[in-house]
Image: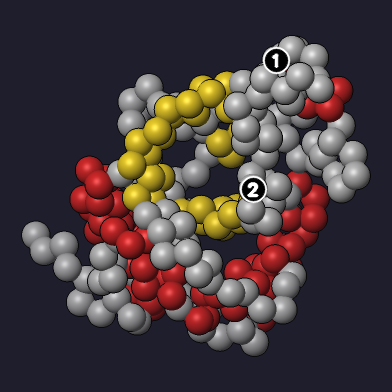
C-alpha cells in the first residue's frame, strides 16, 4: 500500500468539503458551522468539529504522524499549572503557584514534518486559516513564524501524561490522528480564570480533586478541536 499523498495541496482530497465546505465561505452550511463553533467557544472555551477528515484517509493520517514520532524530542519535568517549576517563596507551599504535576510527552517540530503530508497541507491552506479565524471571531490569522513551534505533532507514549495547566497560547487547534488504546480523554475546566483574577481558590479545589467543574471530551481520528486554554 502506498502512503504517498498524490495531491497534498488540494485539501478536498482529504477534507470532507461536503460536510465542511471551507473552500466556500459563503455557503450557508459553513456559516452554520462557524456560528455553532463560536457559540461553543463562548460558552465553554472549546469547540469540537467531528470527522473533518474523510474516513478513507484515516490510515494515511495515522501513518504520517506515526512515521514522524521517532523524531520526537521527549521531556519529563514537574510543572505548575502556570508553566513554571514552582518553589516560589512569595506563595505558600500548597498554593496553586507552587503545586506541580508531572509533564511527560514528546513533540515533533514543524521543521521535521515533511512538506508533502496532509497536516502540513492543511496548516498552510488559506481556506483553512480563514475558517479557523472565522470560528475564533478574529479578522486575520497569521502563522507562527517560529519554524519549530508553528506546527507540532504531540507524541504521547505509554505512561506519559499532561498535568493540569493553562495554555500559553491564545488558542490551540488540535487534530486527533491516532486513538490511544486506553485513556487519552481530554479534560478541561471552563472559565477558571479571567483577566485580573486568577481564582486561585477554584484552581486549588480542582488540583485537590474537585471534579464538579471538569468537562471531558473524547476525540476520534479526523476530529478537530478549537480550544481557548489560556
Q: Which residue is located at x 50 percent, y 81 percent? A: 126
Q: Spot the residue most to the front.
A: 89
Residue 46 to residue 74: above or below: below
**Left or right of 61 on screen, residue 171:** right
Q: Residue at x 69, y 51 (%)?
A: 228
The percent position of residue 177, horizontal first and vertical second, equals: 37, 50
Tell me, yes or no, if residue 44 can be seen here: yes
Name which of mark 2 and mark 1 comes first in the sequence.
2
The numbered disc on residue 152 is: none
Is disc 1 surrounded by few (<14), some (14 to 19) or many (20+) residues within 10 Å? few
Near-viewer residue (143 or 42): 143
Residue 168: mark in rendering: 2
Circle 2 residues within 10 Å: few <14, some 14–19, many ≥20: few
Look at 90% across and 44% down and name the residue there. Answer: 196
SS at mark 1 in the image: loop
Q: Which residue is drawn at the image coordinates 26% and 56% (left, top)?
A: 64
Q: Is residue 157 above or below residue 121?
A: above
- Pick the residue in front: 88 or 72: 88
Q: How is the image coloured?
A: secondary structure
Amino acid at each position: 500500500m502506498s502512503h504517498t499523498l498524490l495531491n497534498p495541496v488540494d485539501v478536498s482530497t482529504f477534507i470532507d468539503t461536503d460536510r465542511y465546505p471551507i473552500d466556500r465561505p459563503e455557503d450557508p452550511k459553513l456559516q452554520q458551522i462557524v456560528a455553532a463553533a463560536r457559540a461553543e467557544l463562548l460558552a465553554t472555551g472549546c469547540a469540537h468539529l467531528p470527522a473533518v477528515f474523510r474516513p478513507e484517509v484515516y490510515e494515511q493520517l495515522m501513518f504520517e504522524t506515526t512515521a514522524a514520532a521517532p523524531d520526537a524530542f521527549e521531556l519529563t519535568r514537574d510543572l505548575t499549572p502556570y508553566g513554571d517549576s514552582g518553589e516560589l517563596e512569595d506563595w505558600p507551599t500548597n498554593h496553586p503557584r507552587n503545586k506541580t504535576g508531572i509533564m511527560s510527552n514528546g513533540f515533533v517540530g514543524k521543521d521535521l514534518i515533511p512538506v508533502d503530508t496532509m497536516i502540513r497541507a492543511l496548516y498552510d491552506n488559506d481556506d483553512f486559516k480563514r475558517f479557523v479565524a472565522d470560528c475564533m471571531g478574529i479578522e486575520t490569522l497569521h502563522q507562527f513564524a517560529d519554524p519549530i513551534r508553528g506546527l507540532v505533532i504531540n507524541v504521547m507514549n505509554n505512561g506519559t501524561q499532561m498535568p493540569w495547566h493553562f495554555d500559553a497560547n491564545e488558542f490551540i487547534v488540535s487534530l486527533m490522528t491516532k486513538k490511544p488504546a486506553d485513556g487519552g480523554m481530554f479534560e478541561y475546566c471552563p472559565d477558571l480564570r479571567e483577566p485580573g483574577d486568577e481564582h486561585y481558590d477554584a484552581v486549588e479545589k480542582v488540583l485537590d480533586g474537585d471534579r464538579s467543574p471538569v468537562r471531558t471530551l473524547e476525540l476520534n481520528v479526523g476530529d478537530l478541536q478549537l480550544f481557548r486554554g489560556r
